[in-house]
Image (cartoon, coloured by chain):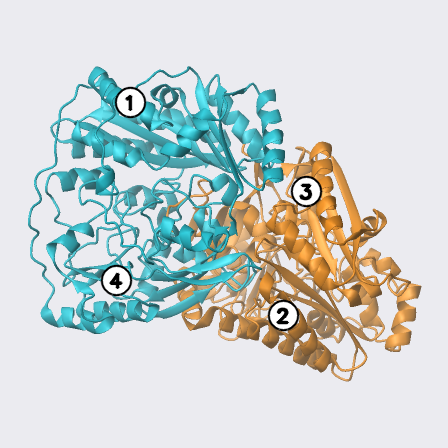
Chain colours: A cyan, B orange
Amino acid sequence: MRHEQIEMHPTRWGDPARAQALPAEARGLVEMVFGVDDRPAVAEQPLTPPVIEAAALAALEGAVGAGHVLTDDATRRLRTRGKSTPDLLRARAGDLTDAPDAVVRPATHEEVAAVLAVAVEHRLAVVPFGGGTAVTGGLVAQREGFAGVVSLDLVRMKRLLAVDHVSMTATLEPGLRGPEAEELLAAEGLTIGHFPQSWEYASIGGFAATRSSGQSSAGYGRFDALVVGLTVATPIGRIDLGTAPANAAGPDLRQLFLGSEGTLGVLTAVTVRVRRLPEVKVYEGWRWPSFAAGASAIRTLAQAGLLPTVVRLSDEAETAINLADPGAIGGAADAGCLMIAGYEGEPAAVAAKQAAVTAVLTGLGGTPAGTAPGEKWSAGRFDAPYLRDSLLDAGILVETLETATFWSNVDRLYTDVKAALTAHLGEPALVLCHISHVYETGCSLYFTVAAKEGADPLAEWQAAKAAACDAMIHAGATITHHHAVGRDHKPWFAEEIGPVGVFLLRAVKADLDPSGVLNPGVLIP
Amino acid sequence: MRHEQIEMHPTRWGDPARAQALPAEARGLVEMVFGVDDRPAVAEQPLTPPVIEAAALAALEGAVGAGHVLTDDATRRLRTRGKSTPDLLRARAGDLTDAPDAVVRPATHEEVAAVLAVAVEHRLAVVPFGGGTAVTGGLVAQREGFAGVVSLDLVRMKRLLAVDHVSMTATLEPGLRGPEAEELLAAEGLTIGHFPQSWEYASIGGFAATRSSGQSSAGYGRFDALVVGLTVATPIGRIDLGTAPANAAGPDLRQLFLGSEGTLGVLTAVTVRVRRLPEVKVYEGWRWPSFAAGASAIRTLAQAGLLPTVVRLSDEAETAINLADPGAIGGAADAGCLMIAGYEGEPAAVAAKQAAVTAVLTGLGGTPAGTAPGEKWSAGRFDAPYLRDSLLDAGILVETLETATFWSNVDRLYTDVKAALTAHLGEPALVLCHISHVYETGCSLYFTVAAKEGADPLAEWQAAKAAACDAMIHAGATITHHHAVGRDHKPWFAEEIGPVGVFLLRAVKADLDPSGVLNPGVLIP
């Protein structure tokens, strides 16, 4: 890639140049609801010196070449944890105790394999690092039992390895960030169509390792559904998977590595289905009298095979706050619930789909709201994390969490998780929700909360989050639809897959990574 | 279920009452091409007496109840092997050496678990048995190292456990055959939409355990894609999987059991996505000047998101033989290639899809052939295995095999497999092919061969099949798109997933089934 990589700020989201003060209307809302309590981050602190022995560092340099094993504070700081609110709260408080001892930058599959061999020999914990956008603790390795922690930074693995215009697939290296991958493919007239909120920084490897799902998943599919092939470096050797679009040749081993969060191997190449760049993109708004009415309409579309490319539905609270239009938060909003429906593709196909969807939604009582709400959503779709930083500056704890369930269980899940959050966050607090990803058999629910920070905002949030996670599991839903397990979701993940599932995952981990050097402490209960 | 179960004939496919003599025109073709050489099956032979000790049989009776452990020859004969041509050749020659020692019929998950516990204690190999339609040796367990072989017959597990009309899912027991499951669901206005050629006998558990794919897969999806939940009895305990339509909660463990062919556990409940029964079914024919032209048109449809419910394309040879219309085999046929396109659903949706597809196909040079070819295909879609029996009676070896690859590799795969079969079957032989399952990124190729039986038809076929499998692997394709691995595909399966994949599968097997009692010798290289 010709780009110089923009590094995210150690204590904030995204491009430091795009950091923004809280917009006036949002600040007004905050002052009205919570009261502003400015809480700036503490000044940057020096890190604890790295503990890795010289022999191990030399072996790492042997694996990746001199100049690609970095132990300076600035580099280590940028490879510390992810970007959850707890991560940011710790970083803002000057706590960077989870910083890796060294950042190692392999350029090829073979160099990744060599790093793993060094890690096994020298008992180093290895944390694969792509975009650094993790929000569930997936970048925090356990130190106990290891002679050091290494961040395996995939920043040098940014090639487009192959494009197949006939089969419509592309093979990408894991370090490519979303925009980098899309730029390379756009030159070929292609797109992956995977645009999660983290897209500007998250990486191809991270998308696969966490079963990411993008805002256009209704049209393009979630990332794990786009993957047709994988190359993985494991401590016991290389594995290449994906000989056909689908097959009956035993269990689908790709599905063990998708979602494995760096604990079973390091993805060194990912082959994905691609589509032609859409000629047309139309995003429009719809109004519904209630969340239930809108959800029922979305279910009707999904089960009729009529899903738009993008479909999202905010509940009454989220609609009232204008969360789909970050620039207008706190401003006037209509009652009811806002749905965004987006169509991408060739003009004729877009027009046909739009007409069919419009007929269904109108028949179900939806009110078209024109393209303005859709355009605002689209313009602001990657901005919410910047807003979170501004709110944290103002002493407002903001975080998101998400889950998914089958349609018949959505009402219960919504009610129970909202109640758990509301009860534990106390007053005043905002608990907002939207349906973000839709399937024939169910959907995801994505919650956003805002509450005034107390004396220990981290502990306060963790209690509320635990209550929400309890509610998800008690409702029979999943602990995570697209944020992965990391460290934060492990107890509930164990409940979700049960004791045999936990045993099986532990056994697979022991089979593939007998020394346990790969992202120890993450995912595996 | 109120049905008495119709058992397949021990040496033939399907309902013995539906056995048929070779139709006159097909017999004429056979006489012209090969010469008829009648080879009736030998008379039914007594089986080797069962070797299981009395204590083990008593323990099995304790697990499932007296009356549900059967050791009579008639029952054992009906649970011997599957229905591949090699299976039939052996059975017709009087070789039933792979008969199980006992047939055990549990009625519940708990009874399945109890059988597994007895098997571990008494060192009995356990072969889960659903419909008995396996074609790759998946029902033949290894005897060495075991005190007997038990067929775990799921014939008593035929309940529809749950229907969720909101989420559009249904939970089924594994012993339900295709028509039984569809009848139960039809009473609810629902369908799975999974109709492989084996559908009349194959079971829900078998569909899941082999990653089956049906003739309507373009519209309804392959079976593994329909599964949202699984309950599995393993020797180390029960596991329930499937908390949401999709999630990011670690690796998708369901995908380890789908395709596991009874080697990792016994599926005791399967939750699938269902659809409303289609109001309209339209099947029509299209003519293409060449296989390549038709394949290109199908690829265009798949990549435009315009697939019909059913889409298949016969090559020139298969078209000339009328294989899509078994009743007309040997009769007059047009030149070029026949495509079948089928549409199922609500009238308006069917009409819209049909119009869009028709426009694309016409623009690409296809010639509509009306509904007659489609209706004939539909009427005969489950009959080919009966025809195979008639041909075996006439001394003609008939078998099928299949593979899949990405679109850019289809020409090579087609050419190489066809050449391998033709070279090894000698003259005269027929090698026919159709595209049977279609994806955005590729498709399956399904080959049918016919050749005059020589002195050792089993060995002759095995040599030709091995050459075809070599060609698949050398072309980078999968060894099986929907027939599973069984025993027959193991050597090539090992090449397909590589040494780390083989190690991983073996390790997972050892983790879940430490005594190795589950279908030993099957799947795991």
Q: Which residue is mark 2?
A: B413
Front: mark 1 or 4: 1
A343 vs B130, left or right, is left
- Alpha carbon of mark 1 to alpha carbon of mark 2: how far? 58 Å
Q: Position of residue A391 (x, y in %)?
A: 21, 29
Mark 1 and mark 4 lie on one chain; the one further toward the N terminus is: 1
Q: Chain of mark 3?
A: B
Q: Residue at x 38, y 60 (%)?
A: A173
Q: Nearer the viewer, residue A330 or A472?
A: A330
B429 left or right of A469?
right
> Marks 1 and 2: same chain?
no
Q: Residue at x 69, y 52 (%)?
A: B215
The numbered mark at residue A516 is 4
Q: In the rendered view, tell whether residue B202 sits above or below residue B426.
A: above
Which secondary structure, mark 4? loop
The image shows residue B399 at horizontal and vertical percentages of 73, 69
Around disc 3, counting alpha carbons within 10 Å, would you say few (fewer than 14), some (14 to 19), or many (20 or more)? many
Closer mark to the observer between disc 4 and disc 3: 4
The chain holding disc 4 is A
Q: Where is mark 3, residue-wise?
A: B182
Residue A266 is drawn in which quadrant? bottom left
Gap in Å between the C-alphas at discs 1 and 4? 41 Å
* Residue at disc 3, secondary structure: helix
